[in-house]
Amino acid sequence: MRTMFVAGNWKMNKTIAETRELLSALKAGLNDLQGVERVVCPPFVSLAAAHELLAGTNIGLGAQNMHWEEKGAFTGEVSSGMLKELCGYVILGHSERRTYFGETDETVNKKLLAAQKAGLIPIVCVGETLAQYEAGQTAEVVSSQTRAGLQGVSAEFASQIVVAYEPVWAIGTGKASSAENAQGVHAVIRQVLTELFGAETAQAIRILYGGSVTATNAAEFFSQPDIDGALVGGASLKVDDFVGIVSQSQIAKGE
Ligand code: 13P
């Protein structure tokens, strides 16, 4: 049985002061909820403050990106070793990074291998654009992103990886995928993971849905057999919404 996993991707939101405020409220709101792995991913500059605030709590900390090299002349970049001092997770290959910052399956793979080396748990994002969705290419696109992104990863590490299916057309649009559609895509991803790493490892990997998840629609996603949680954008910035989503994940799996 996979432990449910809910992560908040704050994107480019919240100053350090605002981060402290939101985390204090989240700590109180999430304290009594058990059986769900929950992670927040604030911007880089807030990670140190968040690390201090979250010490001793059951809320994990993640970054939103990193570079694949360990150090060197890469102005503006952050390495796995720098993150490892502060957090346990890192989002890789988010569609906004693919769209606006030239992220490719190849760079996602390099970063994933760097995360493996550093012992950071990656949340690897895949998902099709609206044009690809309308052309019926979803299965093909997410399969190839998954294969290319996870190339060369050990089965032992693979079992710890978290995959997030985020259809680009559902991100920030208020138009979430139907739970049935998402379940179908998650089943495709799990099949690819089975081919790559074997059934036992594939069954252990959490696959999250992301794209306009709210406290209202979360339960429907979480009741699907291959949906193991959510990667939440906008709703992760509001205490009640994020706490609501985490608590839905408890109810959905009968905790
Ligand atoms: P929204 O929840 O705002 O649609 O964003 C989803 C997302 O991109 C999380 O990584």
Image (cartoon, helix red, strand yellow):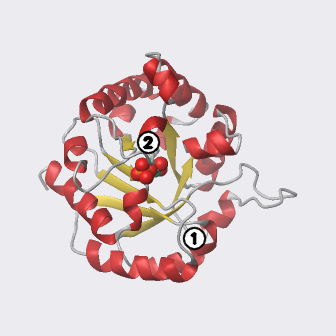
| Three-letter amino acid code at the position of disc 1 | Leu
* Residue 49, x across and y down, in percent: 55, 80
Q: Nearer the viewer, mark 1 or mark 2?
A: 2
Hey, which residue is sitting farthest left in the picture? 254
* Ligand 1 within 8 angstroms of badge 2 C-beta: yes
Residue 96 in which image quadrant? top right
Specify whether residue 173 is in view.
yes
Image x and y of residue 234, in percent: 42, 58
Residue position for label 2: 164
- Which secondary structure lies at badge 1? loop
Front residue of 136 and 243: 136
Which quadrant is home to the N terminus?
top left
In the image, 69: left or right of 121? right
Q: Quadrant of residue 238?
A: bottom left
Q: Whole-percent x and y of residue 170?
A: 41, 40
Tag 1 residue: 86
Mark 1–mark 2 distance (CA, rounded to whole Å):
22 Å
**Residue drawn at 43 percent across, 82 percent down:** 21
Tell me the amino acid under the disc marked 2. Answer: Ala
Q: How many marks?
A: 2
Residue 45 numbered mark, or none: none
In the foreground, 156 or 186: 186
Task: Please say whether residue 55 is visible from this viewpoint.
Answer: no
